[in-house]
């Protein structure tokens, strides 16, 4: 699974490269926001 | 390698403390708020080392735009399931009839069907008749 390959890390760059801008919004029902990344 | 492990161990207890402070000892389920597209109030701080531990099919976290998401429930519904199957090869593999463009094909076939049904062979004949009448009139007028 391509998604699982990117899990456990920051996949922003790869995600933006492939998906249209509204993808995250359409996924909102099935994913859970856990929090922010510690800087 | 060892340093990375030590960092992970050192960093791990921090989010737990943050959770306890900012959420007043609520359960884990209550803390997992649904993602809001606009951002909303920040829930908790998670380190990349903590996120790196969750990369299995039963427990998958991912970082997007500086936010940590649990995508476990989404894994099975991701359009590209096979690693060899990239987004641009989906069309080649599954053909032009996908869930996304089904409406377009239905509309196309309905329009085509209407066009075929409305075709009348007499229309062609009428046009020829008109032309011959016009020719006759022109001839009579001497042009």
Image (cartoon, coloured by chain):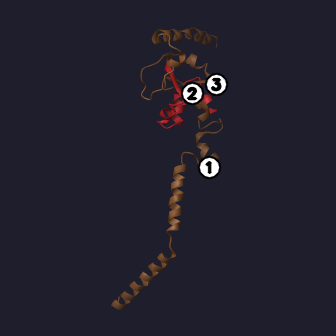
| Res. B95 mark | 1
Rounded to the nearest angstrom, the CA distance separating label 2 from label 1 is 28 Å
Q: Is residue B95 above or below residue B50?
A: below
Could you tell me how far apart the alpha carbons at marks 3 and 2 are, in whole angstroms? 10 Å
Sequence order check: which comes first, mark 3 or mark 1?
3
Q: Which residue is mark 3?
A: B58
Q: Name the foreground residue: B116 vs B15.
A: B116
Q: What residue is at 40 percent from the left and 85 percent from the top?
A: B133
Image point 52% across, 59% down: which residue? B110
Disc number at residue B127?
A: none
Mark 1 neighbour density, 10 Å: few (under 14) some (14–19) many (20 or more): few
The nearer-to-camera label among 2 and 1 is 2
Decide if residue B87 is in sight here: yes
Q: Earlier in the sequence, mark 3 or mark 2?
A: 3
Q: Identify the hue of chain B.
A: brown
Percent across and percent down for residue B53 are: 61, 18
Q: Are marks 2 and 1 in contact (CB under 8 Å)?
A: no
Q: Which residue is mark 2?
A: B71
């Amino acid at each position: 699974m391509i998604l699982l390959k990117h899990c456990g890390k920051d996949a922003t760059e790869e995600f933006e490269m492939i998906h249209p801008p509204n993808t995250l919004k359409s996924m909102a029902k099935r994913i859970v926001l856990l929090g922010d990344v510690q800087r | 390698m060892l340093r990375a492990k030590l960092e992970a161990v050192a960093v791990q207890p921090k989010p737990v403390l943050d959770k306890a402070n900012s959420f007043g000892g609520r359960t884990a389920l209550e803390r997992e708020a649904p993602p809001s597209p606009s951002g909303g109030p920040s829930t908790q701080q998670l380190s990349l080392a903590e996120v790196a531990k969750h990369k299995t099919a039963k427990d998958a976290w991912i970082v997007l735009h500086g936010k940590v998401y649990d995508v476990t429930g989404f894994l099975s519904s991701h359009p590209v399931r096979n690693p060899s199957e990239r987004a641009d090869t989906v069309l080649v593999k599954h053909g032009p009839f996908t869930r996304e463009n089904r409406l377009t094909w239905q509309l196309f076939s309905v329009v085509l069907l209407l066009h075929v049904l409305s075709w009348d062979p007499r229309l062609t004949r009428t046009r020829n008749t008109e032309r011959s009448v016009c020719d006759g009139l022109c001839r009579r007028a001497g042009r």
